[in-house]
Amino acid sequence: MPDHNDPDSQDIARLAQRFFDAIEDGDIDTMRASFTPDAVIWHNSDERDTTVEQTAVVLTGMVARIKNRKYADRRLQIFEGGFVQQHVLTGNRLFDDGAVRLPCAIICQVKHGKITRLDEYFDSAHVAEFRKTSH
């Protein structure tokens, strides 16, 4: 287990904070810049690898549909070469102000201050509420 006072661990913690704060703020450019250009993003719900650009499109859509985005209850664990974060993404749908929540665990591999791989685990039933666009 790395020492959390170690400069590499501190850099990884700052990267994680910046990455999730950017998504909360709807700052897709900062989110995109957190990855290496060839990074791989994988979700347990479809078990497919996606690109940074595909992820940017999905998150742009989420930002357009969900206000008051918050990564609540962040539990960050640093390991050598990356981090794991558990959190609950919360917010409200724009069309009806309905509250949404998505418990999630994310594992990221990091190299030279950028995310090279992100594996996301969540219950796909919660995602349906995020994707709703009308009653």
Image: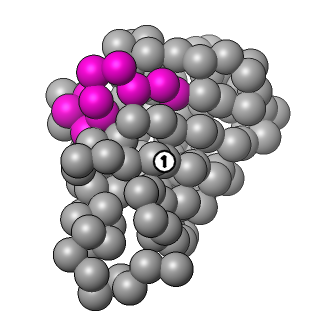
Q: Camera-side residue: 1 or 60?
A: 1
Q: Residue at x 74, y 19 (%)?
A: 46
Residue 69: where, in percent of width, then height?
41, 46
**With 112 as the anchor, is 77 left or right in this view?**
right
Instruction: Tell me which corner region of the image, top left, top right, bottom left or bottom right, holds residue 88.
Output: bottom right
Magenta segment:
32-41
Is residue 51 in view? Answer: yes
Q: Secondary structure at mark 1?
A: strand
Residue 13: where, in percent of width, then height?
32, 67
Kindly identify which residue carries mark 1.
108
Residue 130 among magenta residues? no
Relative to residue 91, is residue 80 depicted above or below? below
Residue 38: where, in percent of width, then height?
35, 20
Relative to residue 118, is residue 68 depicted above or below? below
Q: Residue at x 71, y 42 (%)?
A: 122
Relative to residue 95, is residue 18 depicted above or below? below
Q: Main secondary structure of the magenta part?
A: strand
Q: Residue at x 28, y 87 (%)?
A: 5
Q: Camera-side residue: 96 or 110?
A: 110
Instruction: Tell me which corner region of the image, top left, top right, bottom left or bottom right, holds residue 129.
Output: top right
Q: Camera-side residue: 111 or 60?
A: 111
Q: Residue at x 26, y 69 (%)?
A: 8
Q: Amino acid at mark 1?
A: Cys
Residue 36 among magenta residues? yes
Q: Residues within 10 Å of mark 1 (few under 14, many from 20)?
A: many
